[in-house]
Amino acid sequence: MEQQVNPYEAGQAHQQGYSDPSSEMPVTAAALSALIATKFWVSLVGITMLVIIGLNLISMVFMGSNMRAGVPASMMLVWVIPLIMVVIQVILAVRLIQYGKAIGRLQGSASNQDFERAMEVHTKFWKLTGIVIIVMFALMILTMIVGIASA
Amino acid sequence: MENPYQTTESQAPSGGVFQQQQGANGISATSIAQSHLYSSKGWVRFISVLMFIYFAFMILGLFGMFALVSQVGGVAILGVLLMLVMTVVLFMLANSLSKYSTAIGRTEISRNPGDLETAIMHQMKFWKLCGILTLIALVMALLSMFVPALAFR
């Protein structure tokens, strides 16, 4: 039996609940295929980052276990900064993996929300990278000033 | 039954080709997705500028290495070659990020799907290069672990 089509039915864009379709920009087939091609590389970089962080953590734990008890408090600072760096690197690696997963979901669903999610995660990655660089520069300058002042 | 009121391709407004492509994959960048993309522009530009500055420092370092090669000779050439490769790779990374940022800026002004496509292409090139470098680094790390182990057997 032939399926009847309702001519008054809301279109796909309506069903997804867009408030202002005029501001939407079509994602071309070439752009989509480029984004899908990004998925593998982004996931590879993210997973490799996690593996390297894991190896670094293991070496840090070994170094810590080799150190004798009763380490002075000033030596604890030597551990705090690398640990903060490890946490930041983990967040960056997870963001990359999330970006890859969002692209994978977009590939499967072809939904605008998944494209939004991919763009959101990618932006968060760059923002965090930028902030980390600024903080590192600030710390470097601070260390230089403290070094010059104490000399 | 055909719809006699349907707009033909020739009657479609500007951007009709892109509308057809949107129909093919059904995806469009909503205003939220666009705002996410545009907000990354500044950070991407910032990182690319830093990479270009680092590139300039590496060029200076290369000149220093050339001076070292002229004094020491032979062995230092390997170091110069390695640094040269690293400098070229850094330039390529910085360049693709810079192009990505510029394309985002163009998309923001023109709202043209073609510019969005260019932006996504450039970010793909950047991540592809990063991925290839990661693979090379992984292979070199594995070789540095296994080759000495095999040599001492």
Image (cartoon, coloured by chain):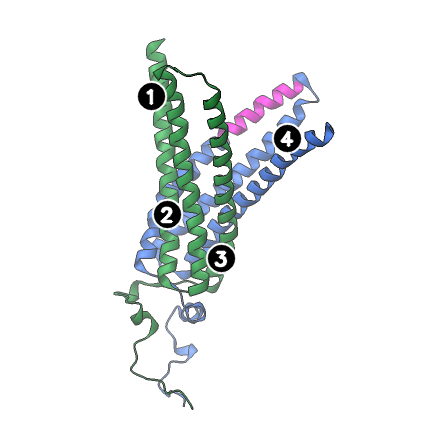
Chain colours: A green, B blue
Taking the spot 51% from the left edge, 34% from the top edge, the residue there is A55
Disc 3 residue type? Ile
- Determine the residue positioned at 40% across, 30% down: A83
Q: Is the magenta stretch mostly helix, strand or loop?
A: helix
- Magenta-drawn stretch contains B63: yes
Position in image of residue A37 (x %, y %): 52, 55
Foreground mark, 3 or 4? 3
> Residue A45, image x and y in percent?
50, 44
Which of discs 4 and 1 lies nearer the camera? The answer is 1
Q: Which residue is tagged 3? A: A36
Residue at image point 36% right, 62% down:
A112
| Marks 2 and 1 close (CB-CB < 8 Å) | no
Q: How crowded is mark 4: few (under 14 residues within 10 Å), some or many (20 or more)?
A: few
Task: Please tell me if label 4 and label 1 are on a single chain.
Answer: no
Q: Which of marks 2 and 1 is nearer the N terminus?
A: 2
Q: Do the residues labelled 3 and 2 touch (CB within 8 Å)?
A: no
Crowding around mark 3 (Cα neighbors within 10 Å: few <14, some 14 to 19, many 20+) is some
Q: What quarter of the picture does the N terminus of chain B occupy?
A: bottom left
Chain ID, mark 4: B
Residue on which the image places disc 2: A123
Q: Which amino acid does label 4 sit on?
A: Leu
Q: What element carries label 1?
A: helix
Give the spatial CA distance, label 2 vs label 4: 35 Å
Mark pair 2, 1: CA separation: 29 Å
Is A23 left or right of A86, judged from the image as shown?
left
**Mark 1 neighbour class, 10 Å CA radius: few under 14, some 14 to 19, many 20 or more:** few
For label 2, the crowd category at 10 Å Cα-Cα, with few meaning under 14, some 14 to 19 and many 20 or more, is many
Q: Residue A142 carries which label?
A: 1
Q: How many labels does the image show?
A: 4
Q: Residue at x 38, y 26 (%)?
A: A81
